[in-house]
Image (spheres, rainbow, N blue to C red):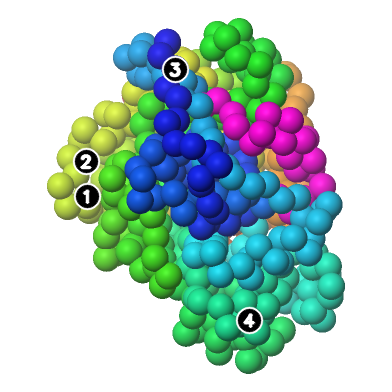
Amino acid sequence: MSIIYYHYNASEIRSGILHIGVGNFHRAHQQFYTNILLNDEDQKNWGICGVCLLPSDEKIVKNLRAQNLNYSLTVYGRNGEDEVYKIGSLKELIWGVEDPEAVVRKIADSSIKIITLTITEGGYNLDKESGKFILNDEKIQHDLNKPAIPATVFGFVAEGLRQRKMQGGDGVTILSCDNLQHNGNTAKRAFMAFIEAQDKDLAEWVEVHVTFPNSMVDRITPATTAEDIERLNKQNGTNDYAPVYCEDFAQWVIEDNFISGRPAWERVGVEFTDDVTAFENMKLSLLNASHTLLSYPAFLMGYRKVDQAMEDRDLVKFIRDFMDKDITPFVPAPENTDLEKYKETLIERFANHSVSDQVSRLCFDGVSKFPVYIIPNLDKMIKTGADLTRPAFLIASYRHYLKYKTDDQGNVFEIGEPWLTENDKQFVNSEEPQEFLELSAFKGVLLKDSEQFIKLYSRFVEEIKDAGTASVLQSIIK
């Protein structure tokens, strides 16, 4: 186990980036790249000011402040070679619940050139059916009145940009780091819809002075439990209240559209491109879709860790068949990318025992994940007459997971679906399986119009209930 310390003088670092959502992925990904880059003498203005906006962020804020915002990142190699990085790139940390005015002032500060976001797929407040911004949300309505203390990320950013405009400040780039297709376009649609409804003059300024590049991010980063903290500290000889661990693979591809400059991230492995589409299609359709495909069947079969599930040969074949037969025909590889090697690497990454991701994390918020990871390619499969066995089994498993909340062994569990609507809940509770296909997560495709899908799905619903998930999976992979 090698420990890698940063070599820059932390007192010389200045914040040029403001990041909203200081979770584990951000601290294992963007902070990782930036921490290495800050060792270069000409990059010292690209430290990161973290912003947390939720009451539930209190613990992470207090823990990081207790150790001068430094923390350890343990990178577990697939070859058994592990590294521990001391991360010091988090220069400031503001908790909006405690000091909302400080958040607004920092967004308005001309030294901030980039605002980055990890607010999750559901955080952009877009209707899953229409794709439109949900203006009638209670907190959004509150923020449209320009309150002194905003309630949403949209209210905070709009107020900060309004003050930046009034002060004659430079433009800024808003860079989404969330797992969304065309995440920059999504961020622009959401923020512009809010700002146009709140302040037409500001909206005109934003159109000229704010850019929203798309990006593709990739690094498996599990949640850190209390047991993980104890294990990491013992292993690393540290006393870290907020450690993070992740796999050794990392990728970040960004469209090079930064209105007020950017860090030289390309020096530390970040790829810049004119169009990120091919990269994000590959990642979302293979890695994220395969994670979703694995999640519900594996959880129902009793697996709680991804690496343990990957010891099941049936699940591995299920995933590999999905990659090869269902996804590859519709996903062109980006230039200079070996797609076969990429898929082989994905299987290795999922099976990394040292990372040991939670299956429950993959199951969380499926209603937001299906429209992004599964539905686009499923729509293509239906239109081209492809075999729908695997996606039909997945959706039947998802219904069983939501409706019965019991796995094959009879273990009862709680589900994590913060964005289920009241209509969704009625479809889940219905005894008629086809009503489940009206779920908001599936609005992008007419599943009921596919005779093949309905036949397979209906069969799997009954077989999972009667024989269990594992038995049905075995019949699929033969």
Which residue occupies 39% across, 50% down? 43
- Of residues 332 and 18, the one drawn nearer to the viewer in this rendering: 18
Residues rendered magenta in the picture: 52-73
Residue 163 visible, this orientation:
yes
Q: Quick one: label 1 or label 3, which is nearer the N terminus?
A: 3
Q: Quick one: label 3 or label 4, which is nearer the N terminus?
A: 3
Does residue 156 sit above or below 453 in this rendering?
A: below
Residue 294: give x, y in percent of width and height: 48, 32
Q: CA distance from mark 3 to mark 4?
A: 44 Å
Quarter of the C terminus within the rendering: top left
Q: Are marks 1 and 2 in contact (CB under 8 Å)?
A: yes
Residue 339 is labelled as 2
Residues packed near mark 4 inside 10 Å, few (<14), some (14 to 19) or many (20 plus): few
Mark 4 lies on a secondary structure that is: loop
Which residue occupies 55% across, 53% down? 15
Look at mark 3 in the image and give the residue it sits on: 3
Look at mark 4 in the image and give the residue it sits on: 167
